[in-house]
């Protein structure tokens, strides 16, 4: 029971942190002149965000790119996404 409570608290803390980073990302974009807003980038040069409409190409290169990194920026939102193409190649070695 204590482990479940701890996991719940950690999950909630992670979700709150991502929400705060998301708000910071939106503020970061809104501070730019309108013509310079890209709606994707990094908060504090560390945490990636992308608020553009997802495309099939970005979904594919994010989640299935055997030549890409193990994790990359999410297709939409804040944080990282696993690259299953990389992981499949890694596990098949």
Image: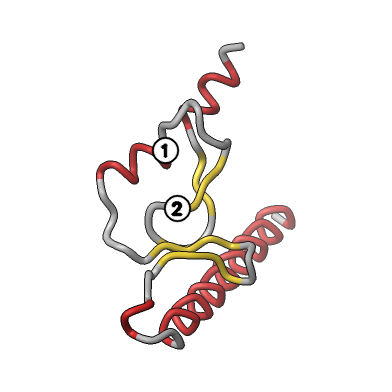
Q: Is residue 73 left or right of residue 3?
A: left
Of residues 74 and 8, which is closer to you in this image?
74
Task: Find numbered disc 1 in the image and state the secondary structure of the residue it sits on.
Answer: helix
Q: Residue at x 32, y 80 (%)?
A: 35
Residue lying at the far top of the rendered structure: 93
Residue 60 figure quarter: top left
Distance Cα–Cα, label 2 vs label 1: 9 Å
Label 1 crowd (10 A; few <14 / some 14-19 / many >=20): many
Of residues 65 and 1, which is closer to you in this image?
65
Task: Give the percent coordinates (x, y) of residue 17.
Answer: 60, 71
Task: Find numbered disc 2 in the image and state the secondary structure of the residue it sits on.
Answer: loop
Using the image, determine if residue 92 lies above or below residue 12: above
Q: Is residue 59 left or right of residue 65?
A: left
The answer to which of marks 2 and 1 sits earlier in the sequence is 1
Using the image, determine if residue 88 lies above or below residue 80: above
Q: Residue at x 55, y 65 (%)?
A: 42
Of residues 28 and 80, which is closer to you in this image?
28
Number of marks drawn: 2
Task: Give the percent coordinates (x, y) of residue 25.
Answer: 49, 75
Label 2 sits on residue: 74
Of residues 73 and 11, which is closer to you in this image?
73
Label 2 crowd (10 A; few <14 / some 14-19 / many >=20): many
Q: Is residue 15 left or right of residue 55?
A: right
Residue 36 figure quarter: bottom left
Image mark for residue 63: 1
Q: Quadrant of the C terminus?
A: top right
Q: Is residue 22 left or right of residue 7?
A: left
Using the image, determine if residue 55 lies above or below residue 79: above
Q: Quadrant of the N terminus?
A: bottom right
Image mark for residue 36: none
Task: Give the percent coordinates (x, y) of residue 59.
Answer: 34, 43
Task: Give the percent coordinates (x, y) of residue 6.
Answer: 71, 60
């Amino acid at each position: 029971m204590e482990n479940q409570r701890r996991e719940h608290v950690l999950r909630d803390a992670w979700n709150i942190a991502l929400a705060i980073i998301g708000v910071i990302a939106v503020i970061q974009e809104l501070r730019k002149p309108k013509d310079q807003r890209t709606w994707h980038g990094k908060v504090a040069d560390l945490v990636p965000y992308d608020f553009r409409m997802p495309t099939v190409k970005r979904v594919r290169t994010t989640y299935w790119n055997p030549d890409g990194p193990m994790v990359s920026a999410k297709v939409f939102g804040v944080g990282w996404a696993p690259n299953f193409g990389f992981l499949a190649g890694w596990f098949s070695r």
